[in-house]
Amino acid sequence: MTVKHTGRRLPWAAMARMAGRRALLAVPVLLLVTFAVFAVAAASPFDPVKAYAGTAGLTASQENLDQLRANLGVDQPLVTRWWNWLTSALTGDLGNSGVMRQPVADVIGERVGWSALLAAAAFAVAILLGTALGVLAARRPGGWLDRCAGSAAYTLEAAPAFWLGLLAIWFFALELDVLPAGGLTDTASETVTPGQVASHLVLPALVLGVSQLPWFFLYVRQGVADALDEDPVRGARARGLNERTVLLGHALRSGMLPMLTLIGSRVPELITGALLVESVFSWPGIAAATVQAATSVDFPLLAALTVLATAAVLLGNLLSDLLYGLADPRVGFDG
């Protein structure tokens, strides 16, 4: 990506053209990723047939295992398996998951919405809290808030998400008994209600959001601090504008530009963290399906989940560039 100073806000048509170019470039990336999944799975020492058969595979004859291997299509060459999956996927058929014993589309459809809800809530927590703390810390560099928030950010940056999850369960669910420890609904409930989902979402969303918060805090804090030392902001203060207008109307807008580029780069970390947090809190997302697909070498499910994660990363990078262009009217993008 090259940046040019146009002196005007990025037109919607130019944004659409950039999105179209990115979509075309994403096609070979996704093809390569899916092929790599099948190649890694083929080189794996795990036998998907025995994983599918379970305990029955221990006593099954070789003839039965060979027949099952043919039924699952894992007896075909690597390229053939990949091509058959790809052509079927283009028609909407993602194949059947051997480990889940149901269509891959159903496996993903039942779980991806809950994962997306958790990721969106966590991202909102990280951005809002990180921005607020970053602005307040940058207002008085070296002050008590700046030192405390900075120390906490570096500590959280080194803390694994699953450890934060276990700590949150111990404190909020066991000690204080104010929030549920996991799941989607209460144990005795037979229906899923918005209220129960909201209460069960609080802890995993906070844990995942706090695990991402240090990066947003540090970027906003540094960006706003640098903006406060720039001549335009000093000029605004000299003209008698109140501190709130200077801070939010001038310094924050300029200081948030580096943070916007961070959004796309944090998507892979967010996906990884979401898998750990979902496992800790028994959240019904795609974490369990991902783990089972990996350990059982479930070719169709692995490929579909990898494509989904790759597409999320590509969309995150595109979103960063679009937000940057909208936030800074001087920025334009060339192919």
Image: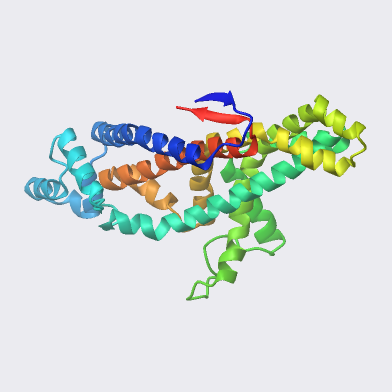
Q: Position of residue 208 (x, y in %)?
A: 59, 47
Q: Pick whichever, 324 or 169, lies toward us.
A: 324
Q: Position of residue 174 (x, y in %)?
A: 66, 60
The residue located at (56%, 51%) in the rendering is 120
Q: Is residue 268 left or right of residue 127?
A: left
* Residue 83 seen by the camera: yes
- Quarter of the image where the C terminus is located: top left
Q: Is residue 185 left or right of residue 61?
A: right
Q: Pick whichever, 293 or 114, lies toward us.
A: 114
The residue located at (46%, 41%) in the rendering is 16
* Residue 136 seen by the camera: no
Image vertical order of residue 175 relative to residue 248, above or below: below
Image vertical order of residue 89 relative to residue 197, above or below: above
Q: Position of residue 206 (x, y in %)?
A: 64, 52
Q: Quadrant of residue 327?
A: top right
Q: Position of residue 63 (x, y in %)?
A: 6, 47
Image vertical order of residue 183 relative to residue 26, above or below: below
Q: Pick whichever, 46 or 55, lies toward us.
A: 46
The residue located at (39%, 46%) in the rendering is 291
The residue located at (19%, 49%) in the rendering is 58
